[in-house]
Image: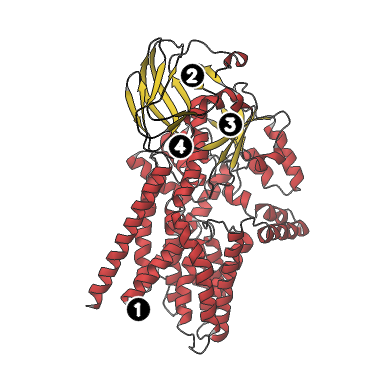
């Protein structure tokens, strides 16, 4: 009877997981024009590298050269294997994450098997929501896989502390976890420390050897291609500069670099919620210290999670929404349950701290699951639109970027210059060199001034310290809502292409709801460039029920694709010719498209619904007569 109740409770948990997944997925599609998009540009870095490996045999962000831009070789190779079987697509990362989430749910369920079915159900569900599971699903990255591997490692190491021998499964999990994320090195350090203190040399050597395959092989591959041993993101964002000081014998510079980085992590959190989350993590570490003082059992059970929090805080990153740090929860949960076994009931301080952690930490994390669609919308409205803009107007150009994933994945022949250093070797070497920060910035600035790029697009505060003289801002896109993007606004800089402003204005018809600003927004009237013809009335047209407007376009007769950027959820717009009806289903300005055959009479837009609608731009893509110069493009209209 007990087993049947547990099976029914587990089935209910899976049904709720699937139901909420469907709701979140529908919300993502609604916010992203009916398409699947992940919340982080990093997901598209892995996908671009896997795509180029399968199609061109090049492990790189583009097909032109090798780049160690992925910090998770296991995830990148998993995607490459999936692309070999199913072809290049965007849904494979989500499918992998769902599979790993299903396994994780069962493994956490098993951890609580000694409790009653109702407690087992509630604690499993609460823990998974607190990760937060759905935000990680739509990150499109390796975090759920890493969390699963770390959780299994923690359980097996606890059994080892209880007297069992380490199995081959433990060593395999350790190897895979190191391939999934390099933060697994913190766990390895804790494991090795305990083994060496206990004199278990054989276990320590086997653990060290099992952790080496992915980092060693990936590192050798990096060195053979002229990069450093570590993945570019780990080296640039981590402590590679500090390590370079020590390797060059500059002990004082190394410690100064480490303390500077530590100070940055402790004082630069501009998001109050992130500061609170870090405080709660340290409160959790304090809880284990309290249990160490008042509980019963071996010391590693109590201190390992505390040491892991400290190591991650000193050497890695916390982010909000929570992403990098979630494996700490997966590692700590089995240790917490083991530690609570020795807690005496008369000790009230530890339960109080546990309650504080639950209230201050888990509740905000629950809310993050509901924000997954907002994260995807941010990437759709910013990085994906950047990728589409490059594909339309610069399909074979050289572009300077700081977010490289989406542009690389959606464009086959674009050459990318990455001034962050994840995909451009010259910048990478400058970034990890043990020289003062101002000198590094000057070298990057000098490099960018010589790359002969067509244009650049970046977050202003990122590129401003290295912005070459002569690069002028041509326009800006600002998100209405932002949750996970590194910046809310991107700036386009004119480098070589003199028609950048015109192309940005033509691209306006394709944009969802973003705030556009800059010189290009002043272009009004009929704007033509090659096969693109934009009619921009200078203001938003409000079409009341029964109203219409005729647009007298003098264009060569032929077949055109029309893009109408309009707003009015529930409204119906008829386009003549050919008399096709558009049903508007968005509350924001969104591009709707259809095919038309134009003669000499232009087109008409008629509101055939009982609801008002707004029209911002109409763009026609079709036969072009000539390439006009910029002064000839602007034709004033009412």
User: What residue sits right under mark 4 in the picture?
Assistant: 52
Across and down, in percent, residue 7 comes to 26, 70
Dot 3 and dot 1 residues touching (CB under 8 Å): no
Q: Earlier in the sequence, mark 1 or mark 2?
A: 1
As drawn, the label of residue 3 is: none
Pick whichever of labels 3 and 4 is earlier in the sequence. 4
Say what secondary structure mark 1 lies in: loop
Question: Nearer the observer, disc 2 or disc 4?
Answer: 2
How far apart are the alpha carbons under marks 3 and 2?
A: 25 Å
Image depth: mark 3 or mark 4 in front: 3
Of tags 1 and 2, the one toward the viewer is: 2
Q: Residues within 10 Å of mark 1 (few under 14, many from 20)?
A: few
Q: Would residue 230 be seen by someone viewing this image from the given angle?
A: no
Q: Nearer the viewer, residue 605 or 149?
A: 605
Which of 622/520 is in front?
A: 520
Mark 3: secondary structure: strand
**Could you tell me how far apart the alpha carbons at marks 3 and 4 are, in whole angstroms?**
18 Å
Q: Are marks 1 and 2 in contact (CB under 8 Å)?
A: no
The residue indicated by pointer 2 is: 533
Q: Label 3, label 1: how many angstroms apart (C-alpha)?
A: 57 Å
For disc 3, the marked residue is: 399
Q: Which residue is mark 1?
A: 114
Residue 119, image x, y percentages:
36, 75
Question: Do we see residue 2 in this rendering?
Answer: yes
Label 2 – label 4 distance at C-alpha: 34 Å
CB under 8 Å between discs 3 and 4: no
In the image, taking residue 438 as reference, residue 636 lies left or right, namely left
Helix, strand or loop at mark 4: helix
Q: Residue at x 48, y 50 (%)?
A: 73
* Residue 310 shown left or right of residue 409 in the figure: right
Which residue is located at x 25 percent, y 69 percent?
Answer: 8
């Amino acid at each position: 009877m007990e087993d049947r109740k547990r099976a029914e409770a587990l089935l209910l948990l899976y049904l709720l997981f699937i139901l909420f997944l469907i709701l979140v997925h529908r919300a993502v599609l609604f916010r992203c024009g009916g398409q699947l998009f992940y919340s982080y540009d990093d997901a598209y870095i892995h996908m671009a590298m896997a795509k180029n490996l399968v199609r061109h045999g090049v492990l790189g962000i583009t097909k032109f050269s090798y780049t160690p831009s992925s910090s998770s070789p296991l995830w990148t190779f998993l995607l490459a294997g999936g692309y070999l079987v199913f072809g290049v697509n965007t849904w494979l990362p989500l499918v992998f994450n769902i599979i790993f989430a299903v396994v994780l749910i069962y493994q956490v369920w098993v951890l609580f098997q000694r409790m009653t079915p109702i407690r087992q159900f509630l604690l499993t569900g609460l823990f998974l929501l607190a990760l937060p599971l759905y935000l990680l699903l739509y990150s499109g990255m390796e975090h759920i896989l890493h969390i699963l591997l770390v959780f299994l490692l923690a359980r097996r190491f606890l059994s080892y502390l209880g007297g069992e021998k380490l199995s081959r499964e433990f060593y395999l999990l350790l190897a895979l976890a190191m391939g999934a994320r390099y933060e697994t090195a913190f766990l390895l350090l804790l494991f090795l420390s305990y083994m060496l203190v206990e004199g278990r040399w054989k276990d320590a050597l086997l653990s060290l050897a099992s952790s080496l395959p992915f980092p060693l092989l990936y590192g050798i591959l990096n060195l053979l291609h002229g990069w450093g041993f570590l993945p570019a993101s780990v080296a640039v964002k981590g402590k590679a500069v500090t390590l370079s000081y020590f390797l060059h014998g500059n002990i004082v510079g190394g410690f100064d670099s480490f303390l500077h980085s530590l100070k940055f992590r402790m004082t630069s959190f501009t998001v109050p919620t992130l500061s609170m989350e870090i405080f709660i993590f340290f409160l959790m570490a304090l809880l284990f210290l309290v249990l160490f003082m008042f509980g019963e059992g071996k010391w590693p059970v109590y201190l390992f999670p505390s040491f892991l929090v400290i190591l991650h805080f000193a050497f890695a990153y916390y982010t909000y929404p929570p992403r990098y740090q979630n494996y700490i929860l997966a590692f700590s949960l089995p240790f917490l349950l083991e530690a609570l076994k020795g807690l005496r009931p008369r000790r009230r301080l530890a339960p109080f701290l546990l309650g504080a952690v639950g209230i201050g930490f888990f509740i905000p994390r629950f809310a993050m699951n509901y924000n997954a669609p907002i994260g995807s919308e941010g990437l759709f409205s910013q990085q994906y639109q950047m990728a589409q803009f490059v594909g339309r107007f610069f399909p074979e150009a050289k572009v300077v970027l700081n977010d490289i994933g989406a542009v690389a994945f959606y464009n086959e022949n674009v050459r990318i210059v990455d001034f962050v250093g994840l995909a451009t070797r010259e910048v990478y070497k400058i970034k990890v060199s043990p020289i003062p920060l101002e000198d590094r910035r000057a070298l990057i600035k000098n490099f960018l001034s010589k790359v002969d790029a067509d244009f650049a697009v970046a977050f202003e505060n990122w590129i401003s310290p290295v912005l070459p003289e002569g690069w002028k801002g041509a326009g800006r896109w600002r998100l209405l809502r932002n949750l996970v993007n590194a910046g809310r606004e991107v700036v386009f800089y004119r480098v070589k292409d003199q028609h950048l402003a015109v192309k940005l204005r033509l691209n306006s018809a394709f944009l969802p709801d973003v705030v556009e600003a800059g010189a290009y927004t002043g272009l009004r009237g009929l704007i033509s460039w090659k096969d693109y013809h934009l009619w921009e009335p200078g203001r938003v047209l409000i079409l009341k029920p029964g109203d219409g407007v005729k647009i007298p376009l003098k264009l060569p007769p032929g077949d055109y694709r029309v893009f109408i950027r309009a707003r009015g959820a529930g409204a119906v717009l008829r386009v003549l010719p050919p008399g096709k009806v558009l049903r508007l289903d968005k509350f924001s300005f969104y591009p709707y498209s259809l095919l038309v055959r134009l003669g000499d009479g232009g087109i008409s837009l008629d509101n055939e619904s009982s609801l008002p609608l707004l029209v911002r731009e109409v763009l026609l893509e079709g036969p072009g007569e000539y390439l006009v110069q910029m002064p000839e493009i602007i034709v004033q209209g009412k």
